[in-house]
Image: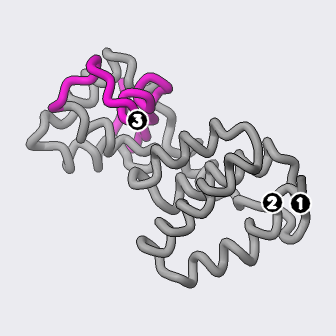
């Protein structure tokens, strides 16, 4: 199974269940699935979810296909510590820019930005992506303050595709 240091991730089905409120997800498991964010360990989740079933609730999500097989925390920590952007000031290709935005807003906004991140990932072009970025910046300002928005504009904002 897993140990207390293992980090769990939402599956694509789990992400859809949260975003679209799919009936396949029992109501009592919704808050459990929301807390599975790819950052918290099983031990931390079990403590947070004690009143909702703890490890058995997590196991139920795995059996429903809402949570992917466990990922060792060392892999997840390495991925989370990677810099979002390598070279500041250079425009990125659209698909790479979307990938960077999804990683950035997913990390900065956490569960609060989950639907926004899904919408960004599905944006077909910059025209569709721009209003989502603005909404993300509004959320970033609310949760992290104006300095975080200024930092975004000075780094990732400068790397937006020109087209």
Quarter of the rendering occupied by the N terminus: top left
Q: Report the residue at 13% width, 34% height from top.
A: 53
Residue on which the image places disc 2: 160
Q: Local crowd at mark 2 within 10 Å, few (<14), some, or many (≥20)?
A: many
Where's residue 85, x and y in %? 77, 61
29, above or below 74, in the image: above
* Left/right of residue 80 with respect to residue 51 in the rendered view: right
Q: Is residue 81 left or right of residue 156?
A: left
Helix, strand or loop for disc 1: loop
Residue bearing mark 3: 19
Earlier sequence position, callout 1 versus callout 3: 3
Q: Residue at x 64, y 81 (%)?
A: 150
**Local SS, label 2:** loop
Q: Main secondary structure of the magenta part?
A: loop
Determine contact: label 2, label 1, CB under 8 Å.
Answer: yes
What whole-number distance in Å separates the C-alpha atoms at marks 2 and 1? 5 Å
Asked if the residue under mark 2 is in contact with the one under mark 3, i.e. CB atoms within 8 Å, the reply is no
- List x then y, in percent, for residue 84: 70, 59
10 Å crowding of disc 3: few (<14), some (14-19), many (20+): some
Q: Identify the residue shown where x is 27% and y is 23%.
A: 25
Q: Is residue 137 above or below residue 76?
A: below
Q: CA distance from mark 1 to mark 3?
A: 30 Å
Q: Is residue 94 above or below residue 66?
A: below
Report if the CB atoms under discs 1 and 3 are less than 8 Å apart.
Answer: no
Q: Which residues are magenta?
A: 1-28
Residue 124 within the segment the image draws in magenta:
no
Picture disc at residue 91: 1
Residue farthest to the left?
A: 51
């Amino acid at each position: 199974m897993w140990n207390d240091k293992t980090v769990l991730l939402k599956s694509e089905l789990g992400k859809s269940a949260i975003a679209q409120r799919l009936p396949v997800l029992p109501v009592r498991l919704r808050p459990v699935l929301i807390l599975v964010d790819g950052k918290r360990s099983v031990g931390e989740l079990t403590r947070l979810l004690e009143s909702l079933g703890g490890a058995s609730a997590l196991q139920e999500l795995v059996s429903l296909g809402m949570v992917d097989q466990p990922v060792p925390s060392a892999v997840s920590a390495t991925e989370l510590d990677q810099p979002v952007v390598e070279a500041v000031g250079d425009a990125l290709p659209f698909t790479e820019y979307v990938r960077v935005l999804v990683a950035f807003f997913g990390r900065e906004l956490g569960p609060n930005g989950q639907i926004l991140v899904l919408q960004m990932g599905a944006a077909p072009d910059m025209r569709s992506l721009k209003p989502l970025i603005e909404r993300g910046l509004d959320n970033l300002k609310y949760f992290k303050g104006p300095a975080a928005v200024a930092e975004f504009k000075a780094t990732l904002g400068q790397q937006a595709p020109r087209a």
